[in-house]
Amino acid sequence: MDDARSRQVVIAGAGVAGLTAALAFSERGYLVRLFEQAPRLEAAGAGIQLSPNATRILRQLGVLDRLLPAAVRPEAVVLKEAATLRELARVPLGEAAERRWQAPYLVAHRADLQDALMARLAEQPDISLVTGARVGGIAAGPRHTTTTVEIAGKTIEADGFLLIGADGVWSAIRALGGFAAKSRFSGELAWRATISADSVAGEALAAVGAADCVTAFLHPGFHLVAYPVSNGTAFNLAAFTRGEIIAEGWSGRADPNILAGAMRGTAAALARLAEDAGPWTAWPIHTVDQAQPWTTPAGIALIGDAAHAMTPFTAQGAAM
Ligand SMILES: Cc1cc2nc3c(=O)[nH]c(=O)nc-3n(C[C@H](O)[C@H](O)[C@H](O)COP(=O)(O)OP(=O)(O)OC[C@H]3O[C@@H](n4cnc5c(N)ncnc54)[C@H](O)[C@@H]3O)c2cc1C
């Protein structure tokens, strides 16, 4: 294999996993071609939690300093009973977390993390990012893999010793690469709303005591997680209920009666907050069986949600 090809990595998908992997490979001297199907990498998604296992890596990659101005360092994770708003438990974060784990616990808007990763990527001449580029085929050779990419109605081929499928929970690479793992609907729906801190809903949230913390309101068959994003100017609300499968995607719609029904019996202040915060978007929570292989001998590897999408209940989706 010629020298350039033996150092060439091809990555499908420029989400959190693909962008991070591109930076990590480039730092180790590899050439990276990164293909993203979306026409532009624009602000998409809502809040994500970044625990110290993730922020430590962002620091190593030169990304953390770019993220800090937009991120929030919550003081604690607080668990409350949704019916009474009684505090059940509190895990200190803030400086305590940083002292303990030598890296901060942060909450941020997904778009701010993506911007910070992109800003660092722009400084790396060995990474080429092409948007509007959908990976649609793979031919695995003995020593390198040829990836077929569709760009503006044309098809190009990209060779590399390694193809990384970072194309998310509904990964095409998983099927194209012959991986046994499949994504499976978990039976849960996630509901999302982002509210401005100075809106009626923002004030309602502050009134139930969640302004500078990650607060989880717990109820049988329902929970709601709230935390500040965008330097504290907005709050991310994510609620979880059982539900029927809805279309794949991160900003879908589901019957609001499911959410209202799941919240029956929660405190009136919380029900009002949910009403003021709407309209809610929804996504179907899928998981990928982590016991299955995520690499092949032919030089294809899955990472991120493509490899191990998980329910978001330990707030590790973005970190992993
Ligand atoms: C638009 C969007 C909004 C999201 N919003 C939230 C949110 O609000 N809250 C939350 O907890 N999580 C959200 N997520 C998921 C969250 O980002 C991931 O769970 C986590 O960060 C793991 O990231 P990932 O890079 O593995 O996957 P993803 O972030 O899903 O990134 C996968 C990327 O691969 C691209 N892609 C897919 N197929 C191909 C292909 N064939 N060729 C080239 N590119 C391809 C996708 O366009 C996407 O950019 C969102 C993801 C996306 C894409």
Image (cartoon, rainbow, N blue to C red):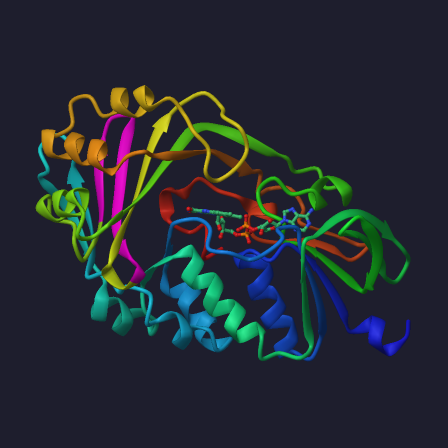
Give the percent coordinates (x, y) of residue 136.
Answer: 77, 46
Give the percent coordinates (x, y) of residue 305.
Answer: 55, 47
Give the percent coordinates (x, y) of residue 146.
Answer: 85, 56
Question: In percent of the image, x 26 and y 65: which residue is there?
Answer: 73
Assign the magenta stretch its main secondary structure: strand
- Residue 2 visible in this rendered orientation of the protein: yes
Residues 145 and 45: in front is 45
Instruction: Reply above or below: 183 against 27.
Output: above
Apparent side of residue 79 relative to residue 56 in the rendered image (left or right): left
Question: In percent of the image, x 86 and y 52: which residue is there?
Answer: 140
Residues in magenta, as a range: 215-230
Apparent side of residue 204 relative to residue 305 in the rendered image (left or right): left
Apparent side of residue 240 relative to residue 306 in the rendered image (left or right): left
Instruction: Reply above or below: 214 against 218.
Output: below
Apparent side of residue 164 relative to residue 220 in the rendered image (left or right): right
Q: Is 9 a magenta residue? A: no
